Amino acid sequence: MARPTEAAPSRGRKPLAAMPHVILGRDLHPAGRALLDARPDITVEVLPESTTEALIDRVPAADAVVLFLERMDDRALARGNRLRVVSRFGVGYDSIDIPACTRRGIPVAVTNGANDIAVAEHALMLMLGVAKHVVQYDRDVHQGVWRALNSHPMLELHGKSVLVVGFGRIGARVARLCAAFGMRVMVFDPGFPTPRIAADGHVPVRNWRDALPQADFVTLHCPLHDGNRGMMDRAAFAAMKKGAVFINTARGPLVDEAALGEALASGHLGGAGIDVLVVEPAAGDHPLFRQPNLIVSPHNAAAPDTCLARMAQRAAQNVLDGLDGTIDPGFLVNPEVLA
Amino acid sequence: MTQGMVVVATRPPHPEAQKQFDDAGIEVIEVRHGDLPGLLAAMPRVHAVFAGTMPVPAEAIAAAPHLRIVARHGVGYDAVDVAALTARRIPLTITPDANAVSVAEHAMLLLLAVSRRLVAYDARVRSGGWIPAPELPTHDLDGRTLLLLGFGRIGARTARLAAAFGMRVLVHDPFVPGNTVKGAGAIPAPDLDAALAEADLVSLHLPVTQATRGSIDAAFLARMKKGAAIVNTARGALVNEAALAAALHEGRLAGAGLDVFVDEPLPADSKLRSAPGVVFTPHTAAYTAQAVRRMALSATASIFACFEGRLGPDDVVNREVLPAG
């Protein structure tokens, strides 16, 4: 058995030289923790709190880290001289300075293939929830207000058009589910050959902005990087159809939240469903929350237990494979470090 | 053939339907939902009822000597006195093709919303909460078992959607051959008890009849798996609401997604209101813009077909009133 060191060792104590030490930003789901605990040749530590400061404090002792939303930037990397693998719990990696990791030869792994089902389901739920005004109607019924005729006009997904931005594991699943609902599915992904998108039965789109006016629903499934930060800006929302619905289960900073708020307040958009925000956790009085027909969830698309278990197993396996030098480049954001 | 005919509408017809009536010289009298005296006052002149959800009782039918058809805007007809119509050989029609898509979508929404506690998490974020709460666990639909009670138009459509989500779909419907269910890719479940013991989610898609009224009772709920959830987009009268509220309050069931209730609007003293894990909608499943239009046009088409003597059997509930052959 590994020696779980639940509390952080006192500062300054030297870690055992030979034993690789793994630091977890938060404790892992038992399914993943068990993989680490089963290894007698490593030690495991959980940060006292899941913050970047705590990470910076403890990172000198780490041969491997599992990160949630703690930032792995130059400050942390400068102190992480022992680091041999950075394992992200999740698939986004905007919280990690990838070029800096690559320069230092540190592989950055993500838990791809573990959360696509859960996030795709969540995106469909938000589409349906906004289309049917479920939060407003639930509040109405609980408060004793029965349906006033056409009080919250509802849409069918069937026969409507959706623009899926990003055709990775999650976007491809969302596209399939939308097709099952009888939607016309347009797909934009510059990294994917358009004949392949067409072969999957969808309509490939060469330029996502040009497709906005045709879409009744727009749903984001792309990673965040400097090239697309704030891509959903005033012009993008203005280009959307009147009454259209915007869904974001990808990353908050893809969106100019003020522009989204204006598009909802003016009634140009019919509604929005968002699982992610620019700043998380969000304050309860976030101005967006005052807008009509907005459904919000706390970045919990991937929170179902089966999904957390799969992600934790993957994150732990990525740590072990990284330490053992056997990691599958398919799980790496920067596979070039293996070359 | 239609000039001078009079239709009473217990819900406002869709503008396209209204235009068809206007163009044909048909007078439409609108009666507010629930205004029985208004309905009774109109009936002596009426040739057709364009029927919303308000009841069309025997006394209204008796007050209408010229009545030729009652066309339901929707598919449920428990609020219409069919026997009184049949006795006078008056057809009752429904709009079977109009709402299946919307209701099946709504059932999927409620299955997802209950499994992922959509409403509770929305409220949690608005009150400043963020990290997922241990007392509010969420579940994927993928890999879970769904039991559908009823495999008609809506149930069958829900089965297809649920299968697309990777669910294992069991179907209990004594009126549908097992091979039909198998052919649609679902699993026939003739033994209800065995199916309830397996199902993580149960969704109701059956009409209210003498046999089904109140059949989702304490005994039924007790046979469901602990932590399972139920979705009802069919009819409130299928469910014993006191028993359902008790199962939710006691934590035996994890949730309920309800679009329909025994009494609508839901009474202020209903124990369901304070139950944990619930998502409510006010009988809106079938009322998307598209479905409302289709229902209105379908009901209107039945009224025209009746006036023009060409009403076929497809949408008629009491087919015995139609001419033979």
Image (tube, helix red, strand yellow):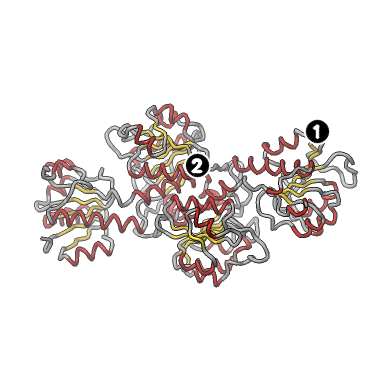
Could you confirm whether marks 2 and 1 are on the same chain? no
Q: From the viewer's perspective, tell me whether residue B260 is left or right of residue B62.
A: right
Q: From what the image shows, is residue B194 above or below residue A173?
A: above
Secondary structure under the numbered disc 2 in the rendered image: loop
The residue type indicated by label 1 comes to Pro
Q: From the viewer's perspective, tell me whether residue B6 is left or right of residue A145.
A: left
Task: Name the residue beneath numbered marker 2.
Answer: B166
Q: Residue at x 43, y 53 (%)?
A: A137
CA neighbours of label 1 inside 10 A, class few (<14), some (14 to 19), many (20+)? few
Circles 2, 1 touching at the beta carbon (< 8 Å): no
Q: From what the image shows, is residue B127 above or below residue B193?
A: below
Of A86 and B122, nearer the camera is A86
Of A84 and B291, nearer the camera is A84
Q: From the viewer's perspective, tell me whether residue A305 is left or right of residue B305.
A: right
Q: From what the image shows, is residue B276 above or below residue A181?
A: above
Q: From what the image shows, is residue A21 above or below residue A188?
A: above
**What is the x, y in percent for residue A132?**
43, 55
Circle 1 chain = A
**What is the x, y in percent for residue B138?**
56, 43
Of B275 and B187, nearer the camera is B187
Secondary structure under the numbered disc 1 in the rendered image: loop
- Quadrant of the image occupied by residue B202: top left
Circle 2 chain = B
- Quadrant of the image occupied by residue B149: top left
CA neighbours of label 2 inside 10 A, class few (<14), some (14 to 19), many (20+)? some
**What is the x, y in percent for residue A254?**
61, 63
Q: Residue at x 29, y 32 (%)?
A: B211
The residue type indicated by label 2 comes to Gly
Q: Residue at x 56, y 69 (%)?
A: A259
> CA separation, marks 2 and 1?
38 Å
**Location of the N terminus of chain A (image quadrant):** top right
Task: Name the residue beneath numbered marker 1.
Answer: A40
